[in-house]
Image (tube, rainbow, N blue to C red):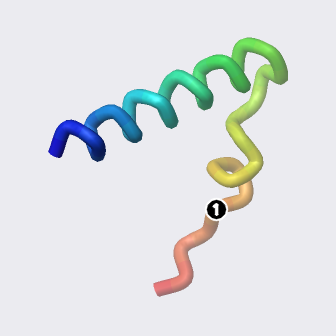
Amino acid sequence: AAAVRQRMADVRTRHHAWIREHGTDLPEVADWSWTG
C-alpha cells in the first residue's frame, strides 16, 4: 500500500505544480469524460 500511497502523493504534487504554472487542470484531468 505504501507504493500506491506514494504514487498518489506524486500525482497530486505534479497536478498542483501544473496548476500553479498554467492556471488550469492537467490536460488528462480537464479532458476527462465519463465513458460508462
Give the residue type that dot 1 points to.
Trp
Q: Position of residue 9 (x, y in %)?
A: 39, 29
Q: Is residue 27 left or right of residue 13?
A: right
Instruction: Name which residue lies at 53% across and 74% down.
Output: 34
Of 9 and 33, the residue lying toward us: 9
**Is 33 placed above or below 10 here?**
below
Which residue in the rendered view is the most extreme toward the front?
3
Q: What residue would you read off at disc 1?
A: 32
Instruction: Name which residue lies at 59% across and 21% down.
Output: 16
**Is 25 placed above or below 20 here?**
below
Which residue in the rendered view is the most extreme toward the top?
20
Q: Quadrant of the N terminus?
A: top left
**Is 1 placed above or below 19 here?**
below
Q: Position of residue 12 (x, y in %)?
A: 48, 29
Of 8 and 21, the residue lying toward us: 8
Instruction: Name which residue lies at 33% across and 33% down.
Output: 6
Which residue in the rendered view is the most extreme toward the right?
22
Mark 1, secondary structure of its residue: loop
**Is 28 placed above or below 2 here?**
below
Identify the image quadrant of residue 18: top right
Q: Is residue 18 left or right of residue 15?
A: right
